[in-house]
Image (cartoon, grey):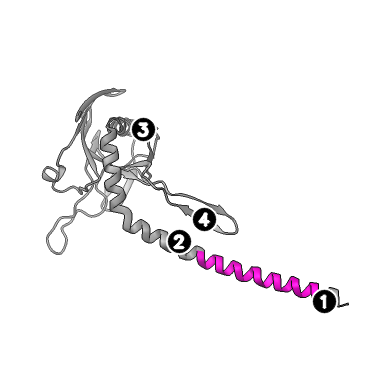
Amino acid sequence: MTEYTVETDFGALHIRRVDHPETILRAVRVYSFRTVYAVSGRGIEGCLAVDPSFNDAECGDIFLGPERRFAAHPTEFSVRCGRSGSLSARFDGTVPKTDPVLVVDGAEVLSPLTSLPRGSRTDFEVTRRAGAYASAPVPALIAAKTLQVVHAVLAFHEEDASLVDRMDVLYTQHRAADRRKSALNDLRHAERMASDLDGRIQRLRAYLDAGATVSTSR
């Protein structure tokens, strides 16, 4: 199923998965792992994209510092919409591509600043484009409408398990090189810490051994 209509608190919302968005939305960034949806409803018009996302939890303690634990598979979604940054043509004349544009009651809403866990309908702060590199809060009604749009699209997206799995594989492949580089950097840092700790352990043992020798010689 590529189309779906759902009733929201603000009326019917029509959702349609956009096949081959690169041929239709020429000014929009398109990736192999990205799924684009067109939405329309009362005061709602435009598109938004759903990307897989990793949740690399940070933990650690006060002595060793934070540790990033790399997730093996994507477990969240990144919802992308709104044009951030300058829209002016570059020096070579090309126009920068952006995320899809979603307009709610006249406001061009921007992507959530955080990834959203799968299987839940997490709320987030909704902002609008207020200039090339600026954003602004939106009225409560626009925020409520936007949240319902995003939640409805994510519910529709998650219903297609084979699509989600396919996008997860493509995203994992896309991120493999840079995530491996990050993990190697963290490993080198941990190995330096281990070397420093080993040196500290050896010095403490040497001190304690020397103290024991002095005590037994008296």
Q: Amino acid at mark 2?
A: Asp
The secondary structure that most of the magenta stretch takes on is helix
Q: Name the residue tied to disc 4.
A: 66
Q: Indicate which label's residue lies in the foreground, 2 or 4.
A: 2
Give whichever of discs 1 and 3 has the lower sequence position. 3
Q: Earlier in the sequence, mark 2 or mark 1?
A: 2
SS assignment at label 3: helix
Q: Which amino acid type is marked by label 4?
A: Pro
Characterize the local packing of mark 1: few (<14), some (14-19) or many (20 or more) Cα atoms within 10 angstroms.
few
- Residue 186: which numbered mark, if any? 2
Q: Is the C-beta separation of discs 4 and 3 under 8 Å?
A: no
137, above or below 180, in the image? above
Q: Is residue 128 left or right of residue 75?
A: left
Q: Which amino acid type is marked by label 3?
A: Ala
Q: Per the image, is 169 magenta?
A: no
Q: In the rendering, at what x and y percent does residue 125 appear?
A: 38, 40
For the residue pair 217 and 20, the one nearer the viewer reads as 217
**CB within 8 Å, label 4 to label 1:** no
Q: In terms of sequence position, does the residue under pointer 2 or pointer 4 come before the other?
A: 4
**Circle number at residue 45:** none
Q: Nearer the viewer, mark 3 or mark 2?
A: 2
The answer, for residue 196, to whether it is visible in the render is: yes
Real-space Cα separation, disc 4 to disc 1, in angstroms:
41 Å
- Residue 36, image quadrant: top left
192 inside magenta stretch: yes
Horizontal and vertical percent position of residue 112: 34, 42
Marks 1 and 3 close (CB-CB < 8 Å): no
Residue 140 - label: 3
